[in-house]
Amino acid sequence: MNQILWVAAGGFAGAVSRYLVSKYTARYWRGNFPLGTFLINVAGSFLLGLLLLHPALTGRLSGQLATGLSAGFLGAFTTFSTLEFETLQLLEKGHWRTAALYVVGSFALGFSAAWLAWRL
């Protein structure tokens, strides 16, 4: 039961953080590219890689804290479904290049961020 509370607390914090980053980014970014979700997903990939793969952290965090941060916070902070929804919106508006850049960039930079965190 304690593990579930860690995930719930992390999920709450992650969802609120995602909302705030999205709102803050939307205030300053007016382009077609969904920058808020892009930044959230790349940062989340880096943090997940750092948390779960980095040798200095692996084993130093309790299982409950690691699960609360990974499944809870980062699970709620990052969002694959929003990436898909925003890509469909771009395609409906005829922004094919932006949609392709968004999908390829999200996966390429997300993977690179996780790899970089692991190699630090």
Image (spheres, rainbow, N blue to C red):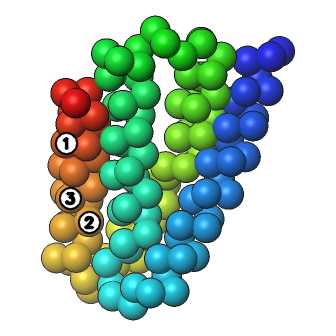
Q: Which residue is mark 1?
A: 112
Distance Cα–Cα, label 1 vs label 3:
10 Å
Distance Cα–Cα, label 3 vs label 2:
5 Å
- Front residue of this view, candidates 65 and 74: 65
Say whether marks 3 and 2 touch (CB < 8 Å): yes
Say whether marks 1 and 2 touch (CB < 8 Å): no
Chain-order first, disc 1 or disc 2: 2
Q: Where is residue 86 shown, x and y percent of the image?
A: 42, 70
Quadrant into which the N terminus falls: top right
Mark linked to residue 15: none
Residue found at x 44% / y 50%:
80
Residue found at x 37% / y 61%:
39
Please say if 13 is above or below 25: above
Say whether marks 1 and 3 touch (CB < 8 Å): no
Apparent side of residue 70 relative to residue 92 in the rendered image (left or right): right
Q: What secondary structure is found at the residue carrying circle 1? A: helix
Q: What secondary structure is found at the residue carrying circle 2? A: helix
Residue at far right of view: 1
Q: Where is residue 71 shown, x and y percent of the image?
A: 57, 30
Q: Where is residue 93 shown, x and y percent of the image?
A: 34, 87
User: Crowding near pointer 2: few (<14 within 10 Å), some, many (20+)?
Assistant: many
Please say if 106 is above or below 21: above
Q: What secondary structure is found at the residue carrying circle 3? A: helix
Residue found at x 32% / y 22%:
54
Q: Which residue is mark 2?
A: 102
Is label 1 or label 3 in front? 1
Q: Which residue is mark 3?
A: 105
